[in-house]
Amino acid sequence: MGLNVIMMGPPGAGKGTQAERLARERGLLKISTGEILRDALKEQTPVALVAKAKMDRGELIDDQTMIAIVRDRLMRPDAERGVILDGFPRTVAQAEALDRILEERDSGPLVVIDVVVPEEELVRRLASRRICSSCGTNAGPGDKSPACSRCGGVMVQRADDNQEVVLERLKIYQHATRPVLEYYRGRPTFRVVNGTQAPERVAHELDTLIDDAASVAVPVKTTTEGAL
Ligand code: ADP
């Protein structure tokens, strides 16, 4: 059976790094909405330019557009084994839409992980974060090389990682995305991980939490079905 994981957490919590590793190690499709949008911006279409203006200010793209993008990816054959979602859902409307899509797909359990990191640490991390301008890979902690370790591309600061925009993104996270955590918190497959630990430590804890949550998800689903 497939496994679906949502990586929740504020910007800079390290969810992208962990999502990448989990997808690779578990053979799941990674759907990172930030990456999809940044790729789409390279096309320079009118729609992309409107999206870019919003992203550069740290604002969210509208729910309808984001839900359509994610629905399209989730319906592809390579999503059948399961997905790791990074950057989605970011609003309660997106979370509700995701539940409906997953129900339609009749997919495996949905595990929700909240990566927790205090705000001062996030601001510090984002100020020094660099990504590859060609393939979008994040530089690892302490990696100061000007070239990407994966493709050799030039490492740059993301347009929305300057301090003013970072503070705006954190504000938007608090009012639009925090309620999504409340939406999921009561589920038996909701788990919290301390994102201030070293990446390997976070990875290790995540593996245990995900396996544990996925194992409780199955009986819960069966019991619910049996009760109907
Ligand atoms: P972060 O480092 O903040 O997690 P992402 O790379 O996930 O950044 O997203 C960058 C930007 O893309 C966001 O600030 C927002 O403008 C847009 N974006 C990404 N995912 C979504 C979404 N699910 N809903 C609305 N906007 C989104």
Image (cartoon, rainbow, N blue to C red):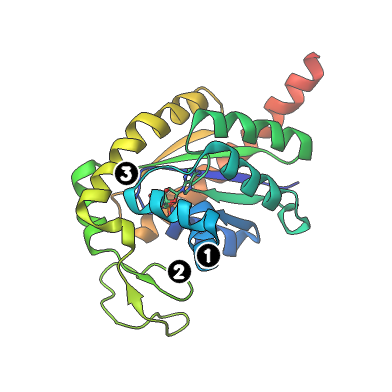
Q: Secondary structure at mark 3?
A: helix
Q: Earlier in the sequence, mark 3 or mark 2?
A: 2
Where does the C terminus fall, quadrant-wise? top right
* Residue bearing mark 2: 136
**Could you tell which of marks 2 and 1 lies nearer the N-terminus?**
1
Image x and y of residue 188, in percent: 56, 27
**Does residue 198 sit above or below 5 in this rendering?**
below
The residue under the point 59% across, 57% down is 30
The residue shown at (46%, 79%) is 150
Question: Mark 3 near ligand 1 (CB under 8 Å)?
Answer: yes
Q: Nearer the viewer, residue 146 or 81?
A: 146
Which residue is at the far front?
46
Nearer the observer, disc 2 or disc 1?
A: 1
Judging depth in this view, the residue of 186 and 75 nearest the camera is 75
Upstream in sequence: badge 1 or badge 3: 1
Q: Residue at x 50, y 63 (%)?
A: 41
Which of the 4 image quarters holds residue 66?
A: top right
- What label does residue 9 carry, if any? none
C-alpha span from label 1 to label 3 = 20 Å
Q: Is residue 183 left or right of residue 130?
A: right
The residue carrying mark 1 is: 39
Q: Residue furthest top?
A: 227
Pointer 2: residues within 10 angstroms few (<14), some, or many (20+)? many
Residue under numbered circle 3: 169
